[in-house]
Image (tube, coloured by chain):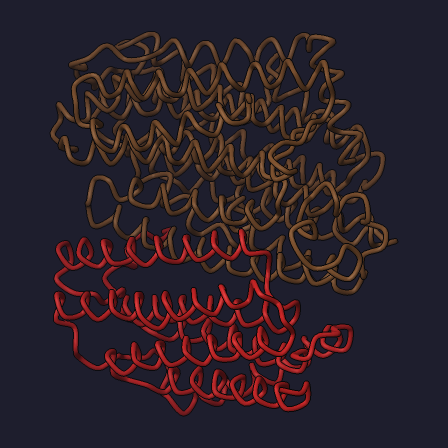
Chain colours: A brown, B red
């Protein structure tokens, strides 16, 4: 019931907004649809906490502690981004960068993207998970090129080609997985259902599964933005409208990583050695280090935070690669806090670029003087994402680091150096943007800053004190995947 | 139809698939490329039909019908209309000259067979020997996407890659569950339309479909 509502609302929203998305009240309708989805996600979460994992619709959908927490997070960030997008897109329209027809496309695709995200998370069928993840690319690609500038078209083309080719590799992985599963579960519908695969994971053919995992990791890893498959990510984040940058970083990357972790659980069951973990640690570490060094070379503010997303996805991939309850706990916590912090940063960055009319960091100055809330939002968000205590990012990064010291001491120096370099690069660039002489103009609509501070407050609370039920929840999920 | 005969027929069509993949690599004209893509779809559908008939897997009839509808008729038609409207009949430029591309292609085929060998041995389908070919056509399409400079051949390369994957699914496992196949088909179809929309945007902006114009976003 809740599942139908969660999946049905954004789908209905997409159809509805395809008709009325250009109307004056369309942004409110968009936010309302996301609010209904959030409510349904809340109901579902409550039910899973009290009743345990459930399956629905002939086992095509399933909910367990791991995906329900991501569903709640996705619905929440989806809703707050819709709130942010109301004034943001109105200001863009006022500045003449979008017209009503494009706004209709934008609103409709925003809901469709939310639909593919929750479908991906809730689907029990690995094949449908693939279809939904490809659907996520298809629904956002025209949004990346929404402004139709040469740069945005180039970014969208790159995004489309690289992600489609990447995800085609994942399809081959799914075929191999099905090939291995079919021998144990028999041909037909159940052989791709994750819950069934999980039960027989120790009987699956190890050679096939290790090959399948390589393809799945490369395929889904392209969407996670793992180096060296990350080329699409900074362009797509920088050239699209900012709400889309926020949901790409906050939702899509998480969901793609979710797909990788789900595959890893199966492969770990079939293989004796820690093959998948080693691969993920390698890719994760490489992403952290390379992204950290690229950070200092960025001139565009959205590009810089896109590289920061690659870095953080690397940390999570590394954490899940290490495995074990503590590292998996840290990975899940980092998923939540990164998603909230990064989307909050993109909200402030969006308004900051609107007030100054540029994404070039050298031209953005004195945000606090012009608009204290935007300035402080960006400053606090930046401190949070850099892992300053008492924010939640510090907690999760600290857990990743201490676990790494225990189990893989060789990796710690790389992580520490990368975090240090990232700190120096981002802090050094954000500080003059926030303080200094103002160079800004007034916005025609009041900016949406409630989502920013709501996100940062949650991240702060998660850093100071994680409520016991949330700890239990994370622990259950971590035990499941660790 | 007995198993060995149908097995040989499937092998025959698999060979066609690989040949067409090579033909696409060597082809300079966009129109011929689309025609080849349609033929590849036809070979795919025919081999799926034979597997369906000889093994009695009814859902494969649907897959075959889907392949004919989508890959032989609808997508080539859409592509035809597109290049008519965009008037791109000119020859395709390649980054590497064609003989060199063919040599790389042969190397890829050998690699693909080596990769598929351990898995083929485990398969118990009549079609297992064709897994190497499926793998090879995926890699060849990949190569085509890399060496082509124009947007349209890149997209045909992508679609041909999907053909290879579809063939891998039928040859290793008698096809994925129907719901997944329908989903994949939907994605491919929507993807083709979006590519189409894109072509117009790109042309409007750059006056050309040459992706060389789209190499501005680089790290400096």
Image quarter of the N terminus of chain A = top right
The one nearer the camera, A139 or A145, is A139
User: Is residue A210 positioned above or below B120 on the image?
Assistant: above
Relative horizontal placement of residue B80, taking residue B23 as reference (left or right): left
The one nearer the camera, A302 or A106, is A106
Residue at 51% over, 17% down: A40
The one nearer the camera, A37 or A82, is A37
Image quarter of the C terminus of chain A = top right
The one nearer the camera, B143 or B160, is B160
Residue at 65% over, 74% down: B55
Residue at 39% over, 22% down: A81
The residue most toward the right is A272
Image coords of residue B108 (percent x, y):
56, 81
Residue at 77% over, 24% down: A476
Image coords of residue A118 (percent x, y):
51, 32
Relative horizontal placement of residue B125, taking residue B69 as reference (left or right): right
The answer to which image quadrant residue B124 occupies is bottom right
User: Is residue A426 positioned above or below A199 on the image?
Assistant: above
């Amino acid at each position: 019931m809740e599942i139908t509502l969660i999946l049905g609302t954004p789908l209905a929203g997409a159809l509805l907004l395809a008709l009325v998305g250009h109307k004056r009240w369309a942004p409110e309708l968009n936010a309302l649809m996301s609010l209904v989805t959030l409510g349904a996600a809340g109901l579902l979460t409550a039910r899973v906490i009290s009743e345990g994992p459930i399956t629905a619709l002939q086992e095509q959908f399933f909910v367990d502690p791991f995906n329900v927490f991501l569903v709640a997070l996705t619905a929440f960030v989806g809703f707050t981004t819709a709130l942010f997008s109301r004034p943001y897109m109105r200001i863009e329209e006022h500045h003449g960068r979008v017209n009503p027809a494009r706004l209709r496309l934008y609103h409709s695709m925003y809901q469709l993207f939310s639909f593919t995200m929750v479908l991906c998370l809730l689907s029990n069928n690995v094949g449908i998970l693939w279809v939904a993840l490809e659907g996520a690319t298809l629904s956002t690609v025209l949004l990346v090129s929404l402004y139709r500038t040469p740069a945005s078209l180039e970014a969208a083309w790159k995004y489309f080609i690289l992600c489609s080719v990447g995800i085609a590799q994942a399809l081959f992985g799914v075929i191999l997985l099905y090939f291995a599963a079919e021998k144990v579960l028999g041909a037909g519908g159940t052989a791709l259902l994750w819950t069934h695969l999980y039960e027989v994971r120790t009987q699956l053919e190890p050679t096939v599964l290790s090959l399948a995992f390589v393809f799945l990791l490369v395929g889904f890893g392209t969407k996670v933005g793992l180096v060296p498959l990350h080329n699409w990510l900074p362009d797509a984040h920088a050239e699209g409208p900012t709400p889309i940058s926020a949901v790409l970083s906050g939702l899509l990357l998480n969901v793609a990583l979710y797909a990788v972790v789900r595959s890893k659980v199966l492969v770990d069951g079939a293989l004796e050695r820690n093959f998948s973990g080693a691969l993920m640690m390698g890719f994760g570490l490489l992403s952290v280090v390379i992204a950290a060094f690229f950070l200092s070379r960025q001139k565009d503010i959205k590009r810089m935070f896109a590289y920061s997303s690659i870095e953080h996805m690397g940390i999570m991939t590394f954490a899940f690669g290490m495995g074990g309850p503590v590292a998996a706990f840290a990975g899940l916590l980092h998923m939540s806090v990164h998603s909230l912090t990064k989307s909050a940063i993109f909200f402030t960055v969006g308004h900051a670029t609107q007030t100054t009319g540029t994404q070039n960091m050298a031209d953005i100055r004195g945000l606090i003087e012009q608009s204290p809330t935007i300035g402080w939002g960006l400053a606090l968000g930046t401190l949070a994402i850099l892992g300053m205590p008492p924010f939640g990012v510090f907690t999760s990064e600290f857990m990743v680091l201490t676990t790494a010291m225990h189990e893989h001491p060789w990796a710690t120096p790389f992580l520490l150096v990368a975090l240090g370099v990232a700190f120096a690069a981002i802090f050094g660039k954000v500080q003059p943007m926030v303080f200094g002489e103002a160079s800004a103009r007034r916005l025609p609509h009041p900016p949406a800053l409630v989502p920013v501070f709501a996100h940062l407050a949650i991240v702060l609370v998660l850093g100071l004190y994680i409520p016991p039920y949330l700890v239990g929840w994370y622990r259950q999920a971590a035990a499941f995947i660790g | 139809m007995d198993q060995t005969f149908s097995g040989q027929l499937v092998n025959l069509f698999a060979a066609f698939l690989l040949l067409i993949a090579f033909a696409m690599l060597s082809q300079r004209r966009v129109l011929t490329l689309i025609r080849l893509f349609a033929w590849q779809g036809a070979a795919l559908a025919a081999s799926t039909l034979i597997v369906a008939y000889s093994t009695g897997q009814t859902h494969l009839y649907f897959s075959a019908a889907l392949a004919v509808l989508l890959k032989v008729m609808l997508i080539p038609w859409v592509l035809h209309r597109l290049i008519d409207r965009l008037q791109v009949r000119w020859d395709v430029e390649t980054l590497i000259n064609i003989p060199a591309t063919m040599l790389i292609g042969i190397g890829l085929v050998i690699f693909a067979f080596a990769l598929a060998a351990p898995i083929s041995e485990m398969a118990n389908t009549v079609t297992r020997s064709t897994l190497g070919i499926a793998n090879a056509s995926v890699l060849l399409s990949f190569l085509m996407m890399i060496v082509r400079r124009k947007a349209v051949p890149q997209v045909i390369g992508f679609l041909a890659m999907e053909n290879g994957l579809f063939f891998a699914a039928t040859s290793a496992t008698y096809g994925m569950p129907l719901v997944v196949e329908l989903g994949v088909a939907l994605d491919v179809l929507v993807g083709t339309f979006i590519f189409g929309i894109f072509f117009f945007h790109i042309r409007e902006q750059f006056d050309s479909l040459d992706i060389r114009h789209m190499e501005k976003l680089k790290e400096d």
